[in-house]
Image: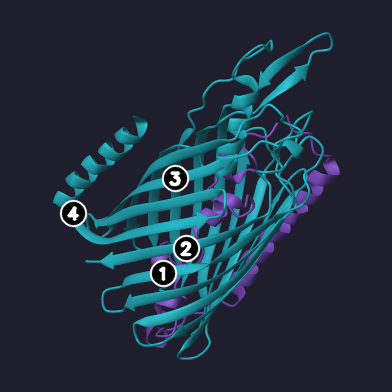
Chain colours: A cyan, B purple
C-alpha cells in the first residue's frame, strides 16, 4: 500500500511539474546480479526538469526485487525448513537545486519500502522460523515492514571556474529495520529480546572534484556516518580519470571505510576504455574488495558476516552522443564473493555466508531533450 | 549492544580521521589547475566525466548491497549488519 502511495504521489508531482517546466533529460537503468540461489534485480527511472534558468527538479522511482532460496543449516538448525523468499523494494526520491552565481544549493528527500539487502531477508526468515510459534517468555516475533525516509542538504561551490568544485552535504535517515532477536539470560530465567527496530543515521560528506591538467580529472570524497548503537563510520572514496591518448581513457578508483571497534573495508578498481569511433567505446574493468567482517556484538547467536573479499571483472559497451549528451551503456561480467569461515555462533548462517559465483549485468540510458 | 571501544581505539580512529581530513583536500587541491576552456576537450569526453548517471558511470548499486564497506547510501544499510545480535 505504501509503495502505491509513493508511486502515485510522485506520478502526480511529475505530471504537475512536466506541465510547467522543461524536461531536460531522463535516466534509466536495469541491473541484475544472479547466482545459483540468490537473484537480485534493481531498476530506476528518473527525470530532470528545468524550472527556471537557475533551478532544477529531479524525481526518481526505484524498483528492486530479491529472490532467495533460504536453506537452514542441517546441524545447527535441524528443525528449520527450506523456503523460497521474495521481496520487492520500492523507493522514491525528489531533489531540488538552485544555482546562485558560483553556489548551488540542493535539497533531497527520499523514501523506500522493502528489504534493502538479501542478507536481512535471509536473517529475518531464520528468526521467523525460530520464534514465530511462541513458547518463549519475553517479546514475540513480529512480521517486519522495513522502510525508511531521509533528507539531505548540500552546497556546491565552484572553487575554480569550470574546473574545481567543492560540495558539502549533511543528511538524516530513519530506517525501520527487521530487528534481530536473542534469548537473554536474566540470571534465574531466560526470555526473548528484540533488537532495535528503528535506526537513526546522520551523515556528512565533503567532496572535491577538480582537474590536475588538461588530461586528468580527479574526485575525492570523505563521508562520516553515525547510526544508532554504532560508532562513527569514516569513509573515503577517490578517483582519477586520465585521457591517456586520443582513443584510450584510464579510470582508477579506490575506497576505504573504518568503523570501531574493528571494521575496515577497502576496494580498488581499474577501467581501461577504448574509443572505437566518435560515438562508440569499449571498456574493461577489474575490481577488488576486502573487509574485516561486520561489527559483531554476539552473545549466543550472531548473524554478523565474516570477513569478505570479492573480485569483479566486466566488459562495457557505450554509445554517447556528444551533440545532446545522451548515452547508452551495456555492461556484463562475472563477480565472485569469498567469505572467511563463520565463527562460533554464526554457523547457522553458513549457507547465507557461502562463497558464490555471480553474474552481473546492467543496461543504462540517459536521454537528453 | 556494542562493546565500548577502548580510548586507544578511539584515539587511533581520531588520528586516522584527522589525517584523512588534512591529506585528502591537500592532495586534491595541490594539483588542481585552472585549465582554460579551449584546453578542456579531452576532459569533456563522456568517459572522463564523473556522473551520477549509470549510463556514464562504472560499477553498480547491487554490488554495494553485497559489500557492507562499499555501501555509500548511508543509513542502516551502510552501517554493518542491521539485524546483528
Q: Which x, y percent locates residue A113?
A: 43, 36
Viewer-nearest of discs 4 and 2: 2
Q: Which one is earlier in the sequence, the residue at label 3 or at label 2?
A: 3
Q: Residues under labels 1 and 2: Cα distance?
A: 8 Å
Q: Which one is earlier in the sequence, the residue at label 4 or at label 2?
A: 4
Q: Residues under labels 4 and 2: Cα distance?
A: 34 Å
Asked if the residue at tag 3 contacts the one at tag 4, i.e. Cβ–Cβ closer than 8 Å, the answer is: no
A16 vs A133, nearest the viewer: A133
Residue placed under numbered mark 3 in the picture:
A65
In the rendered view, would you say A162 is above or below A206?
Answer: below
Numbered disc 4: secondary structure: loop
Q: Chain of mark 4?
A: A
Residue placed under numbered mark 2 in the picture:
A361
Asked if the residue at tag 2 contacts the one at tag 1, i.e. Cβ–Cβ closer than 8 Å, the answer is: yes
Residue placed under numbered mark 1 in the picture:
A330
Q: Residues under labels 3 and 1: Cα distance?
A: 20 Å
Q: Residues within 10 Å of mark 4 (few under 14, many from 20)?
A: some
A65 vs A198, nearest the viewer: A65
Q: Which one is earlier in the sequence, the residue at label 4 or at label 3?
A: 4
* Residue at left offset 41%, top offset 74%: A162
Q: Which one is earlier in the sequence, the residue at label 1 or at label 2?
A: 1
Numbered disc 1: secondary structure: strand
Q: Which x, y percent locates residue A7?
A: 30, 40
* Residue at left offset 35%, top offset 70%: A328
Viewer-nearest of discs 1 and 4: 1
Viewer-nearest of discs 4 and 3: 3
Residue placed under numbered mark 4 in the picture:
A21
Amino acid at each position: 500500500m505504501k509503495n502505491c502511495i509513493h508511486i502515485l504521489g510522485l506520478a502526480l508531482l511529475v505530471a504537475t511539474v512536466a506541465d510547467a517546466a522543461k524536461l531536460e533529460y531522463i535516466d534509466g537503468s536495469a541491473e541484475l546480479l544472479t547466482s545459483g540461489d540468490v537473484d537480485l534485480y534493481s531498476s530506476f527511472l528518473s527525470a530532470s526538469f528545468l524550472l527556471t534558468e537557475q533551478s532544477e527538479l529531479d524525481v526518481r522511482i526505484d524498483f528492486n526485487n530479491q529472490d532467495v532460496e533460504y536453506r537452514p543449516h542441517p546441524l545447527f538448525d535441524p528443525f528449520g525448513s527450506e523456503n523460497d523468499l521474495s521481496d520487492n523494494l520500492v523507493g522514491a526520491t525528489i531533489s531540488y537545486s538552485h544555482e546562485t552565481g558560483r553556489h548551488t544549493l540542493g535539497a533531497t528527500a527520499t523514501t523506500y519500502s522493502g528489504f534493502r539487502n538479501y542478507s536481512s531477508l535471509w536473517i529475518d526468515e531464520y528468526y521467523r522460523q525460530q520464534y514465530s510459534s511462541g513458547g518463549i517468555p519475553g517479546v514475540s516475533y513480529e512480521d517486519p515492514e522495513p522502510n525508511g525516509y531521509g533528507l539531505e542538504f548540500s552546497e556546491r561551490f565552484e572553487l575554480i571556474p569550470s574546473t574545481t568544485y567543492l560540495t558539502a552535504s549533511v543528511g538524516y535517515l530513519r530506517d525501520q529495520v527487521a530487528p534481530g532477536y536473542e534469548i537473554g539470560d536474566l540470571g534465574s530465567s531466560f526470555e526473548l529480546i528484540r533488537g532495535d527496530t528503528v535506526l537513526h543515521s546522520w551523515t556528512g560528506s565533503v567532496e572535491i572534484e577538480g582537474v590536475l591538467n588538461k588530461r586528468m580529472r580527479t574526485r575525492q570524497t570523505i563521508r562520516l556516518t553515525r547510526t544508532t548503537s554504532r560508532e562513527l563510520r569514516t569513509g573515503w572514496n577517490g578517483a582519477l580519470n586520465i585521457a591517456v591518448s586520443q582513443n584510450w581513457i584510464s579510470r582508477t578508483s579506490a575506497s576505504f571505510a573504518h568503523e570501531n571497534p574493528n571494521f575496515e573495508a577497502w576496494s580498488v578498481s581499474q577501467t581501461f576504455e577504448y574509443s572505437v569511433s566518435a560515438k562508440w567505446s569499449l571498456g574493461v574493468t577489474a575490481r577488488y574488495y576486502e573487509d574485516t567482517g561486520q561489527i559483531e556484538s554476539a552473545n549466543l547467536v550472531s548473524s554478523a558476516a565474516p570477513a569478505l573479499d570479492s573480485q569483479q571483472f566486466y566488459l562495457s559497451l557505450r554509445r554517447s552522443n556528444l551533440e545532446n549528451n545522451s548515452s547508452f551503456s551495456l555492461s556484463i561480467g562475472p563477480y565472485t564473493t569469498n567469505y572467511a569461515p563463520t565463527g562460533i555462533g554464526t554457523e547457522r548462517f553458513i549457507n547465507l555466508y557461502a562463497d558464490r559465483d555471480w553474474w552481473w549485468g546492467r543496461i543504462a540510458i540517459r536521454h537528453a531533450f | 549492544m556494542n562493546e565500548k571501544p577502548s580510548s586507544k581505539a578511539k584515539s587511533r580512529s581520531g588520528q586516522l580521521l584527522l589525517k584523512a581530513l588534512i591529506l585528502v583536500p591537500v592532495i586534491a587541491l595541490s594539483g588542481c589547475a585552472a585549465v582554460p576552456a579551449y584546453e578542456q576537450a579531452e576532459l569533456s569526453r563522456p568517459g572522463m566525466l564523473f556522473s551520477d548517471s549509470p549510463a556514464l558511470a562504472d560499477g553498480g548499486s547491487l554490488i554495494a548491497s553485497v559489500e557492507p564497506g562499499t555501501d555509500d547510501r548511508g543509513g542502516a544499510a551502510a552501517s554493518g549488519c542491521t539485524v546483528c545480535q
